Amino acid sequence: MFLISAIVIHDRSMELQQLRYVLAVAEERNFTRAAARCHVVQSALSHQIQSLERELGVRLFARTSRRVELTEAGAAFVPAARATLDAAERAVAEAAVASGEIRGSLTIGTIPTVTAVDLARVIAAFHRAHPAVGIRLRGGGSGAFISSIREGELDLAVLGLPESSVPERVATRVLARERLVAVLPAEHRLASRRRLRLADLADETFIDFPTGGAGRAQSDLAFTAAGVTRRVAFETEGIDLMLDLVDEGLGVALLAPAIVPTDRRLVTVALTDGPSRIEYLAWSDFNPSPATLAFLEILDAHLVAS
């Protein structure tokens, strides 16, 4: 027998599919959604998990008709299950590389403010070159992405960080450095100005990203450095919604200039002391997968061509 996170498993078979089902339920917190995600009927998924629980001699989930939660044993089991599946996928991918084919999966984190690279175009080129690799895209924030890369949950991610924030314990490549601009309604009293200072916007209502994320931090740090207090009345992760709110005259925003469409009734004005950000590509600095390395090669070719 062998030990995984304090769970003793005797000499019985444990299928990788059972582990996939456990992870799906753990992440979805719902058997119906987990079954749909795994493309099986719920009864089959439930049966396999119950069979695994009997084999282990512990309950992995506490469940009622409305609620599903990991038990203490389940919380101990999930990290090892995830590591086992990752190792299995990596073994298949490495074997395929030896035969000249890249397989496996590639999970990419994307922030809503990617401007330095046409990510869709790069992904399309990668898919044409390596059609056997399954690609998963995840939205989110830069800080969470860095942690996910370290923990092996993401292969790559695009990050947008203030100049003072340098990603640690991940490999990175700088894609772009840019200064944010003020985004104003066309009829705004400052819309005709060529340049503004943050102090000029002190009395404005702001629309920004949620507090605590890297997208918000770059502006907060700049206003603090300028000694200017501002009021953020609207918080959203969605760029389109943010621009719509500005268009409705509900406030102003600070964004990268490439994000603002030219076909909208919005004006961008340069800021002399505005926030700057660095856009990075980040990936694991410890034994990146063959798919990750192949993606980096295609990204390099795209950047050179553009």
Image: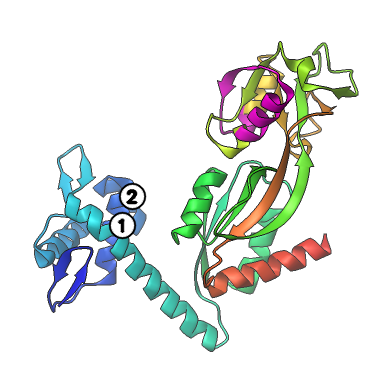
Image location of residue 40, percent across then percent down = 29, 59
Q: Residue at x 27, y 47 (%)?
A: 32
As drawn, is 293 to the left or to the right of 132?
Answer: right
Q: Quadrant of residue 6?
A: bottom left
Residue 28 drawn in magenta: no
- 77 and 111: which is toward the camera: 77
Residue position for label 1: 23
Please, what is the three-letter code of the amino acid marked with disc 1? Answer: Leu
Residue 229 drawn in magenta: yes
Task: Tell me if residue 102 can be seen.
Answer: yes
Q: Residue at x 76, y 63 (%)?
A: 302
Label 2 sits on a secondary structure element that is: helix
For marks 1 and 2, give the CA distance. 6 Å
Q: Marks 1 and 2: CB-CB under 8 Å?
A: yes
Q: Quadrant of residue 39?
A: bottom left
The magenta span reads 217-241
Residue position for label 2: 27
Image location of residue 95, percent across then percent down = 47, 85
Label 1 sits on a secondary structure element that is: helix
Image location of residue 184, percent across then percent down = 76, 21
What colour scheme governs how the chains and residues are painted in the rendered image of this protein? rainbow
Image location of residue 254, percent across then percent down = 71, 28
Q: Residue at x 25, y 49 (%)?
A: 31
As drawn, is 297 to the left or to the right of 24?
Answer: right
As drawn, is 193 to the left or to the right of 38?
Answer: right
Please, what is the three-letter code of the amino acid marked with disc 2? Answer: Glu
